[in-house]
Amino acid sequence: EQEVEISKRIEEAENMVQRLINRFGFIAQAHLDLAAKLTEGGERFDRVILDKKIESRERYMKLLPRLCKQVEKSSKRIREQYMHLLSASRVDQKKLKAFQKSVASLQKLYPKFYFKQKVTEEFVHLADEKFLALTALQAELRKHPQNGTRSPADVRSRELESILWLSVEEYTEQYQDLKGWLRKALRAKTEMVEANLRLVISIAKKYTNRGLSFLDLIQEGNMGLMKAVEKFEYKRGYKFSTYATWWIRQAITRSIADQARTIRIPVHMIETINKLMRVQKQLVQEYGREPTPEEVAEEILLPVDRVRAVLKMAQQPISLQAPVGESEETNFGDFIEDKGAENPSDMTAIVLLKEKIKDVLETLTERERQVLEQRFGLVDGYSRTLEEVGRQFRVTRERIRQIEAKALRKMRHPTRIRQLEGFLDAAEA
């Protein structure tokens, strides 16, 4: 079938990309760096390792250090061999064959890492960086041609070659081949995706009115389809459409769970909510009324507290800007009490009390009024000590105490107290 033919083209292109990328010298260090991250816990095992290819994670991690030592030892030997070839005035065929044999032996070690295809794609980015560095060096060398002495750019170029294990010309040629096979793989994958777009649309139609627009459902389904193209193994014998359907449905249902609600609910809770809703509808038909949480809990075999929590979670939030009534002038948020705001009646009472206190203080002498204001913080809210007030008036703290006592006696006079009695009664109430 057509899908098998496309899958074979994808497989061929990816195998060629793998073979070409493994030819570059810096890939040995890239394998070692990624293995070190795995060992130190800096990289997730399931992100980079093909689980189905290994016996167990424990055994893999146990054998990984030995494999790394082999790669490190082999790459060191190859680098030395290549440096000898670079420094030789003419090509020694025997040394060249030994070098090629060592490279071939090293390439046989790479598959034992069981890295995923996405790791190969990350290695391709390293190849891109090296190619850009080579291109910049070549441009610099063309600007400053050799005049008998080796320029800094020439030295850097030689250092880069020792990392690549290839000459500039060889690396450029193999890099272009690599990019060509990457383009072939991309074209084949695009062809597979485009051939199955109708499948995405047909599945997306079943999930309308669930909180996401139809176009969003198609977009999420396409993401699942692309994932299916990456994961599909035609050698297993099943049809691609059967395999892709699962990935498309998973992508759509997950996106609905993640994006359809204003307040996100974990994906694993969506199934519990759906099950509870089905049971609740069933009990409504049986009883002719809304079932209690206890009745639902008994039917679904869950604790009552758990059922209450799930029911509360299933409620849809209401926007504070939602209009109330037929007129759109009033919003739902206008009816919600602001617990953090000051009580208007309390604020009014405080303003009136301040005005009354000010009126009563006006009946005292200027110095008595100022002393009470300073001592009780009636102006700025900061209560000052006898000593602080004394320094301000340039008198002793004892004199301030006497003025304060006299002023308070005056404030206790019945004519003045009557003006503040109403506020005192309100405070006691």
Image: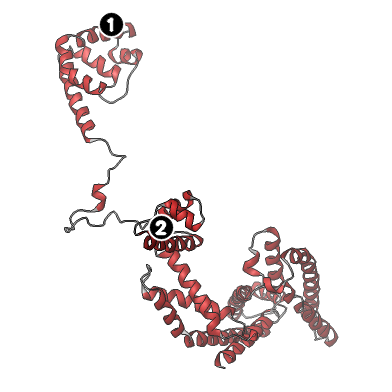
Q: Which residue is drawn at 47% across and 48% down?
A: 305
Q: Across the whole image, how many numbered discs are drawn on residues?
A: 2
Specify few, some or many for label 2: CA neighbours under 10 Å numbering under 14, 14-19, or 20 or more: some
Q: Which is more N-terminal, label 1 or label 2?
A: 2
Q: Residue at x 55, y 93 (%)?
A: 2
The residue to which callout 2 is attached is: 314
Specify few, some or many for label 1: CA neighbours under 10 Å numbering under 14, 14-19, or 20 or more: few
Q: In the picture provided, is 94 more to the left or to the right than 185?
A: right
Residue 90 x %, y %? 80, 86
Residue type at mark 1 is Gln
Viewer-nearest residue: 403 or 55 = 55
Q: In the picture provided, is 236 more to the left or to the right than 103?
A: left
Dot 1 lies on which element? helix
Residue 330 x %, y %? 19, 53
The residue to which callout 1 is attached is: 402
Quarter holding the N terminus is bottom right
Q: Which residue lies furthest to the right in this view?
A: 94
Residue 378 seen in the figure: no
Residue 240 x %, y %? 55, 84
Residue type at mark 2 is Ala
Q: Which residue is drawn at 41% across and 76% down?
A: 206
